[in-house]
Image: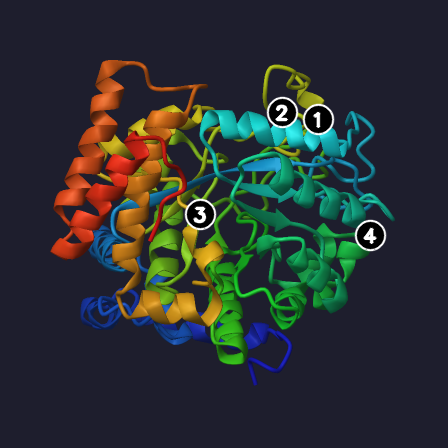
Amino acid sequence: MLLLDTMQLNADFIKELLDNGSAKASDESAVRKQLVKAQKGAGLSLSEAAILLQVKEPGLLKEIYNTAAEVKQRLFGSRVVLFAPLYLSNHCNNGCLYCGFRASNRSLDRKSLSTDEVVAQARALVEMGFKRLLMVTGEEPGVWFSSTIKAVKAVYKETSIRIIHVNAPAMDVEAFKELKSAGVGVYQAFQETYHKETYATMHPYGPKQDYGYRLGVMDRAMTAGFGDVGIGPLLGLYDFRFEIMASIAHSEHLFKRFGAHAHTISVPRLRPATGSGLQTVPNPVSDEEMKLIVAVLRLAVPTAGVVVSTRESAQLRTELLYTGASQLSAGSRTDPGGYGPNKEETKTLKQFSTDDHRPLVDVMASIAKEGFVPSLCTTCYRTGRTGSDFFSKTISGHMETHCRANAILSLKEYLVSVKSDTPDNADLKALFEEAITGSLDEIEDEKLKEGVKKKLEEIEQGRRDLFY
């Protein structure tokens, strides 16, 4: 039995599926059979994903990537959602070997932001153009939960941030209810590795040492009322094929129990971290394997937002947009207090190093140049399109029109509103206007098209936060 009421993982079953799929991965007819099914956008079984994850022939890989891109385009359109992380603290009482925040790292300057400092950081992100942020908490005993609740409420009250996601330690159902009532839209936590023995090695002490409690965290979050949750492994700790299979199994479990797949699946790749306990990456993942990972996740869990962070290079992040990625972080700082004019400059506050250091406006320009539409939309969480409702609308193809319209409107609002990092270069402005016009022309519903045009005019006249 692979799945129970609370998430359980049968590692032997996953390994058996991978063994069975290995021979079929070089069989063109077997691979194309899976792609025909996947192209319909209804997802893949674990056994089918096991085949695609082991394909190596360049021609077949290209077919997988193209199919994933087609599915993403059909379900979400050309929009690419953008957000930024906001680190609240680097205090921690865990011993995770891969992390610069680990408790035994004596070289790290520790810092926890006050509520006022969090608000100042959020305002700095608003000035850049962000409307959505991901709060990343520390795990300071007896402090982190109450300070996070205060921070969430203060940011909503004192800034124009419209939706807050939270990446926080595992907690019980009652704590999740309090977090949800504070206004958090999405709860995110990574299993790091689904391989139990590797998990034990990587987490020698601290609350996070409990594999089972961590694995069941999304069950508790969704039981408490979170319709949208974000999962993912830390790629590089164990064999990526096992980790992606386990991630798909995790999402399948949530769907069977709660009627909704994971809202997002992130694919962070292990990066150097000052003071971490790892000198090398135990199981390196290549750029080509990253493309395959993103593509298989898109095909297996088509409704999920596949998230790529600034751990990756600008070039690879662009390439991953063509294999199914749909969300990017931008301008990220992994140190508490990292944004704004008074940002901390010391490297010893960081959790890990990043590779894409471009500001938001440059990331948006890169997206637009590739023919995609940069989106700062925050609509679904505020209109109730979450959980099973989001899944049903997306899988049926009805979400694409919402995504397209809201991407257009959020990009227009960015153009007329943002003071910091405003693209005052005429070529950049023309690029974004071209993205708006091109996407608008692709709307087939004439009534919707006219409605979007009217809202664009209203934005020009000073109205804000218009959406469908």
Mark 3: which secondary structure?
A: loop
Q: Nearer the viewer, mark 3 or mark 4?
A: 3
Which comes sooner in the sequence, label 4 or label 2? Answer: 4
106 vs 243: above or below = above
Q: State the residue position of label 3.
A: 378
Q: Residue at x 48, y 67 (%)?
A: 387
Q: Amino acid at mark 4?
A: Gly
Mark 4: which secondary structure?
A: loop
Q: Nearer the viewer, mark 4 or mark 1?
A: 1
Give how far apart the Cα atoms at labels 3 and 4 are.
35 Å
Type of colouring: rainbow
Q: Residue at x 51, y 30 (%)?
A: 126
Q: Give yes or no for contact between labels 1 and 2 (Cβ–Cβ under 8 Å).
A: yes
Compared across the picture, whether 66 is left or right of 189 comes to left
Q: Nearer the viewer, mark 3 or mark 1?
A: 3
- Mark 1 neighbour density, 10 Å: few (under 14) some (14–19) many (20 or more): many
From the viewer's side, name the closer residue of 381 and 356.
381
Q: State the residue position of label 4.
A: 206
Mark 1: which secondary structure?
A: helix
Compared across the picture, whether 239 is left or right of 348 comes to left
Q: Amino acid at mark 1?
A: Leu
- Mark 4 neighbour density, 10 Å: few (under 14) some (14–19) many (20 or more): some
Give how far apart the Cα atoms at labels 1 and 2 are.
9 Å
Circle number at residue 338: 2
